[in-house]
Image (cartoon, rainbow, N blue to C red):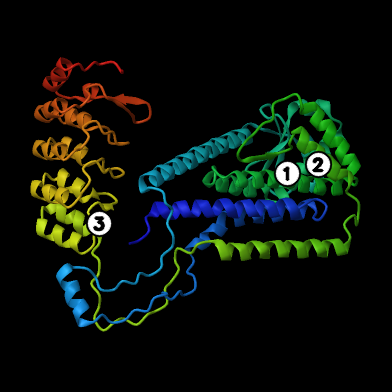
Amino acid sequence: MTMHWTHLLFTFALQHLWHSALLFLIAVVVVTPRLFSAEARSWLLAGTLVLAAASPLMVLLPGTAIAPTSTVTAPSESVQSVARSTGVPTNSSVAPSSERPAVPVDMLQLLAALWLTGTLFVLARLLVGMQQARRLHRTGQADATLRALLGPACPARADVAVSEHVHGPMVVGLLRPRILVPRTLLDALPAEALRHLLLHEAAHIERRDLWASAAQRAVLALFWWSPFMHLIGRRLDAARESACDARAAVQAGSGRRYAESLLNGVSALIQQREHHNALAVGMSVNRSGLTERIDQLLALEPGHVRRGMRWSALGLCVLALGIHASVALAVTPRLGTSVAHVPRPAVRPAESPDARDLVDAAADGDVARMRRLVDEGVPVNASVFGDGTALISAARNGQLAALDALLEMGAQPDLAAAGEGNPLIVAAAPGHLAVVERLVAAGADVNRHVMFDETPLINAARSGDLATVAFLIEHGADVNLGVMADGRRWRSPYNQSRNAVVRDYLVQHGAVAARR
């Protein structure tokens, strides 16, 4: 049977965690200021982030052919006759399959929903940041003096503007970049310091950092739950700032003079709260990050990294990537692993029907077909996404004969399926009283709560079927048992009842309007 999509997603997430952890460790050990320039570090860390996001996809790659360990031989005529009489397939060899996580599908679906919800929330914040960046771009006032101060170093299609709404120099605008300078800095800094800070922002534009930052945040939105992706992202942000510092220092003519300008600019902003915008790139005023940047600026000297050191760093980087690739190829499971071709036996073994056939047979009330499918090996409690189990299907459609047969064959009366409730819940919703009676007699719990599908009594009250409501209460259903649904909404048999007669009956048996 094909792996459920939630198992695939769960496997991908698990593989991502150790892939990203290994890549982060490599980044900490190898991609250091001692071995690489800030420019090189920024691009190496960007590649590390992309690799951490993409490398777990190798779970989808086909592996090498694996031959079954046991030899398949044609069954003898006597074995075939026994197989025909019992319905048991004669082929006992099973093709190897990828190991699946021992986590229930319902739980995996809940985790997948949480993953999607978190991603949508982070993307929504990213869109809000985009709107803020557009507003800052629009409200900034172009300043010819600052533009002239930057001179030929100003990138093409970019301009410089003064803004009342920013707390530090920054760049906004993916298509038409604009450098924004707080008005408070114009009087606080000399012209040389302002020019140095503008050179830093111009370097962001030249390096296409706004585009890189937007892509980085989109990736982090998908992996918002991954701690190592955020750690790599922080290192990438710091390397990006250092790379722009290095470019600005070269144009300023001195790393020390540029560092002094940076300190003067930060001293004017340090008392203000750091401004964050998802699609704006600007000067950081974080104290620990600033210390590291100043240290790197003071170390800027021509040839401070020897040529031999550069080659050693490159070799170490290649070695580290090779180690990661080797470990990943050896350890990552392949969900697409193929099986070596084995000649078929002279008599083709019986094939096990799919669970959907059993669910469809239950919906149609075809008892003979159900018995044949179960005899041929289909689990009587097998669940099909979107329809649930065969017992749920029979209960939903009011198929009493199919229901009795399934219970006789071992179907569990309380077994739930994600999004489908359980047999008693789906039978109570349309008021199939005869089905409800059969299930309760078989041991179904009248107070069983299934996430997203509430309880049997809530569903019966909502349908307005007084007979089903009365039967459930007579057999122990709690008239005040409620659940939280739709965010923070409280649902109970009383507040879900749309029938005055049912509501009065509930009150007569102790139901209250308030939550208990």
Q: CA distance from mark 2 to mark 3?
A: 64 Å
Quadrant of the rendering where the N terminus is positioned:
bottom left
Label 2 sits on what residue type? Arg
Residue 460: image quadrant is top left
Label 1 sits on what residue type? Ala
Q: CA distance from mark 3 to mark 1?
A: 56 Å
What's the residue at 42%, 77% (across, down)?
Answer: 340
Between 103 and 507, the one nearer to me in the picture: 103
> Which residue is denoted by mark 2 in the rendering?
293
Do the numbered discs 1 and 2 sit on residues whose CB atoms are within 8 Å?
Answer: yes
Image coordinates for residue 185, horizontal then vertical, percent: 78, 28
Q: Is residue 142 left or right of residue 446?
A: right
Do the numbered discs 2 and 3 sit on residues whose CB atoms are within 8 Å?
Answer: no
> Which residue is denoted by mark 3 in the rendering?
379
Seen in the picture, residue 393 relative to 65 is either above or below; the reply is: above
Q: Earlier in the sequence, mark 3 or mark 1?
A: 1
> Which residue is denoted by mark 1 in the rendering?
238
Circle 3 SS class = loop
Of badges 3 and 1, the one in the foreground is 3
Label 3 sits on what residue type? Pro
